Amino acid sequence: MTGDLLVAVSEACANSILHTNTPQVRVTWRSSADCVELEILDEGIFKRRVRMPEIEGSGGHGISLMMALVDELSIREGTPASPGTVVRLVKCRTE
């Protein structure tokens, strides 16, 4: 569980830096007996980028990767009228 969260949070933080030009990223987390919830918040404006499959290393797999690693993923995109993107990740214990 910890490894999956570490990769998903790392990807969300990298996406904030790459896609929003934010000067700061904040990570918060809450834990319960069953699940861990993390939020990655920035001050930027989300810039959707189209993946170019013919260009090796162009990225474009981050959201799919995060979806595969966590139980819940939501993204509230920052806009010019309302800056600040929030990525919410939830991973529950499977015992």
Image (tube, helix red, strand yellow):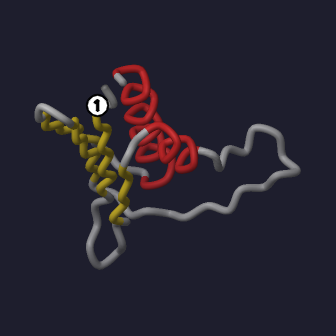
Q: Specify the quadrant that holds the N terminus.
A: top left
Residue 30, percent across and down? 13, 37
Residue 42, percent across and down? 29, 50
- Residue pushed farthest bottom? 81
| Residue 49 quadrant | bottom right
| Residue 29 quadrant | top left
Residue at coordinates 32% horizontally, 45% vertically from top-left?
A: 89
Residue at coordinates 34% horizontally, 21% vertically from top-left?
A: 2
Q: Amino acid at mark 1?
A: Arg
- Residue pushed farthest top? 3
Q: Specify the quadrant that holds the C terminus.
A: top left
Q: Is residue 18 left or right of residue 33?
A: right
User: Secondary structure under badge 1?
Assistant: loop
Packing grade of label 1 (10 A; few <14, some 14-19, many >=20) is few
Count of numbered tags: 1
Question: Eyeballing the image, is 62 above or below 46?
Answer: above
**Location of mark 1 (residue):** 93
Residue at coordinates 33% horizontally, 52% vertically from top-left?
A: 87
- Residue pushed farthest front? 95
Residue 76, percent across and down? 33, 65
Q: Is residue 27 left or right of residue 67?
A: left
Residue at coordinates 17% horizontally, 38% vertically from top-left?
A: 28
| Residue 84 quadrant | bottom left
